[in-house]
Amino acid sequence: MDQRKMHGVWANRWTFILAATGSAVGLGNIWKFPYIAGENGGGAFVLVYLLCIAVVGIPIMMAEVLIGRRGRMSPINSMRYVTSEAGLHGGWTGIGWMGVVAGLMIMAFYSVVAGWALNYVVASAGGGFSGISGDEAGSLFGGLLQDTGRLTLWHSLFSVMTLAVVAAGVTKGLGMVARVLMPFLFVVLAILLVYGFTNGDFASAFRFLFDFKFGKLSWDGVLVALGHAFFTLSLGMGSIMAYGAYMPDHANVGRTIVTVGVLDTVVALVAGLAIFPIVFASPGIEPSAGPGLMFVSLPVAFGNMAGGQIFGTLFFVLVAVAAWSSAVSLIEPGVAWLSETKRFNRVTATIALTLVAWLGGLGCIWSNNWLEDKPASGIYVFESLDFLTSQIMLPLGGLFIALFVGWLMRRAIVASEMDAEGHPLFEIWLFVVRYISPALVALVMIFSLADKFKG
Ligand code: PFF
């Protein structure tokens, strides 16, 4: 078989859109976006985040998909292919390597948080939130974080779920999950939005998210927004490159990626507008509650609403499902690469990499760093993994991808993959990828890291 098509190709453009949206829409949108917006003061952060998506995220996403489709292999080998096509030094393959490592690092904490959601599915279905107060919800969550045995169980279950899908391959595994689960997720988010609107303090939530006050935003906050733009679009680490490698030849990259970017952004904003009205309507819960925001405020709301047991259960099922369809894309780059080496088949490759990420997850669980009272060891595995990947590795990966496509790939190749030679939008995109996106990423990284050293 042609080595460059060994993994399979999505059935059509929409399968790619749904699979890529499945990768993009995940814990980043439903869990992380609301709490980092809360921690960074709301409105101004949201505006910077939206700018980052439009000016940096979407253009770089197109560049990443383009490399994948050109190479038609794992990110490491696709980079090798486009690098040799451009007659360049093999060092650029490092983008693919960094991606594989970043994917495993993210998967380590991602599957632990997804495990929290699984635990909450069971808690909600069993009526555990019924009549609960803010304080009680807080101690329920605190109790879970201290229960390493239970955390390990859920984390392991989620890892096995991910393994099963990735091992089943591109068409049967990844494609099926995206097609079946994504529409389901959109519907339930819409229901929750309506609930927030009718039962919560929607006006305060809206003001909090869209009232652009810049005083509260530091350079650090800007870096968080930029990092999150990469995280939420699954950018800078090869996931989207790997998915691009399975994209049909004739699908238009530009239009397809704009659709994915818009869907992802809409889900994040809707999740914010579903969660914050409930937060503001619950006394004693601050919008800046941190990683526990969703796991503390929503049980209170569900526990005190009619039908909350069913809706609460459904909500956490959906969080877990969104996480599931993203997690598969975190290990896909490494799995694709290992299967290409021929020493592994897809199943053994998936088992090997899931095991590595699973061990990292145990590190997160045992270092207990979600708690207020940090461990004496000072090893904050979760925070370090999150910081290193979201704020350093993904933006750096994106920077190099933009530089590579903008400056080093032959223009004729870029234009033919984009299928847009001579189109004014193509010229604008190329300009952005050459100058604007790399400059912004570099500037934000330099300023915020300098700020950190000063602080
Ligand atoms: N985009 C996912 C989310 O928002 O939850 C997380 C993610 C998946 C990040 C895949 C990076 C990645 F490669």
Image (cartoon, rainbow, N blue to C red):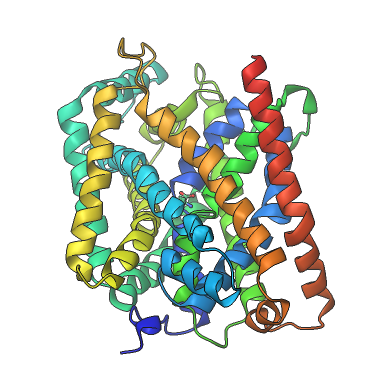
Q: Which residue is depicted at the point 65% across and 71% down?
A: 409
Asked if 319 appears above or below 34 in the picture, the reply is below
Q: Which residue is depicted at the point 76% across and 83% down?
A: 421
Query: What is the quadrant of the C terminus in the image?
Result: top right
Across and down, in percent, residue 72 comes to 45, 77
Across and down, in percent, residue 449 comes to 64, 28
Task: Report the side of 236 relative to 333 (left or right).
Answer: right
Asked if 408 appears above or below 313 in the picture, the reply is below
Asked whether residue 208 is in view, the answer is no
Q: Nearer the viewer, residue 92 or 25?
A: 92
Rendering quarter of residue 89 = bottom right
Task: Report the side of 88 relative to 28 (left or right).
Answer: right
Q: Which residue is depicted at the point 26% across and 26% down?
A: 144
Across and down, in percent, residue 63 comes to 62, 66
Task: Report the side of 116 relative to 17 (left or right).
Answer: left
Rendering quarter of residue 258 = bottom right
Query: What is the quadrant of the N terminus in the image?
Result: bottom left
Asked if 198 appears above or below 146 in the picture, the reply is below
Q: Nearer the viewer, residue 204 or 439?
A: 439
Across and down, in percent, residue 387 comes to 49, 33
